[in-house]
Amino acid sequence: MDENFPELINTRALRKTVDGWFEWLVIEFGEALEIAFLPVLHLLNWIENSLLALPWYVVILGFAALGWVASRSVGVAVSVALMMFFMGFFGLWTPAMATIALMVTSTLLAVLIGLPIGSRCRAPSACRRSRCRCWTSCRRCRSSST
């Protein structure tokens, strides 16, 4: 634990248990997980390399434009541009692009996984066939099942 943060409870036993479980997981399934997530790693690296290959002013203008489109506020667009400029000014450009690539990759994965699940749970007959629990809270499902 951080020496500046007070220790309210002793978490050593819990940390050892979690570390042991994680170590077992890596030993048993590490290679399979690495193979399964290799396409995600390639996507992440591609996005990061693409952001780093572009000139800094193009990236700043692009994200400022995204900020304006999302908020329709010039103030937000200028704030995004200034903050990104200062990230580069203070030497944090490469870590910032790595973070942005990670956020874009995770958002894409969440959308790619979440939309099919959400649309499947929206269809009452598909939910009942798959024994999904989401159909019990759907008004259409409850009204059609009676």
Image: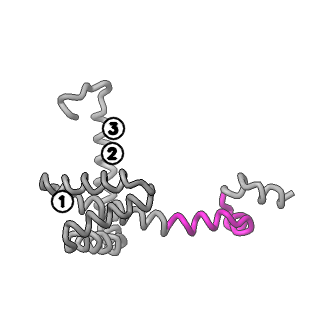
Whether residue 98 sits left or right of residue 70 in the image: it is left
Q: Which residue is mark 2?
A: 18
Q: Amino acid at mark 2?
A: Val
**Is 38 or 105 nearer to us in this picture?**
105
Foreground: disc 1 or disc 3: 1
Q: Which residue is at 20% across, 58% downward?
A: 95
Q: Which residue is mark 1?
A: 93
Q: Are marks 2 and 3 in contact (CB under 8 Å)?
A: yes
Density class for disc 1 (Cα within 10 Å; few <14, some 14-19, many ≥20) is: some
Number of disc labels: 3
Query: Mark 1 or mark 3: which comes first in sequence?
Result: 3
Majority secondary structure of the magenta segment? Answer: helix
Q: Position of residue 67 (x, y in %)?
A: 38, 58
Magenta segment includes 126: yes
Q: Which residue is mark 3?
A: 14
Whether residue 72 sits left or right of residue 77 in the image: it is right
Could you give the CA–CA distance between mark 1 and mark 2, rounded to whole angstroms? 34 Å
Density class for disc 2 (Cα within 10 Å; few <14, some 14-19, many ≥20) is: few
Residue most extreme to the front = 74
Q: Position of residue 125 (x, y in %)?
A: 74, 68
Q: Which picture quadrant has residue 102?
A: bottom left
Could you give the CA–CA distance between mark 1 and mark 3, rounded to whole angstroms? 37 Å
**Secondary structure under the numbered disc 3 in the rendered image:** helix
Query: Mark 1 or mark 2: which comes first in sequence?
Result: 2
**Secondary structure under the numbered disc 1 in the rendered image:** helix
Magenta segment includes 115: yes
**Secondary structure under the numbered disc 2 in the rendered image:** helix
Q: Amino acid at mark 1?
A: Trp
**Is 44 or 28 nearer to us in this picture?**
44
Whether residue 56 sits left or right of residue 115 in the image: it is left
Foreground: disc 1 or disc 2: 1
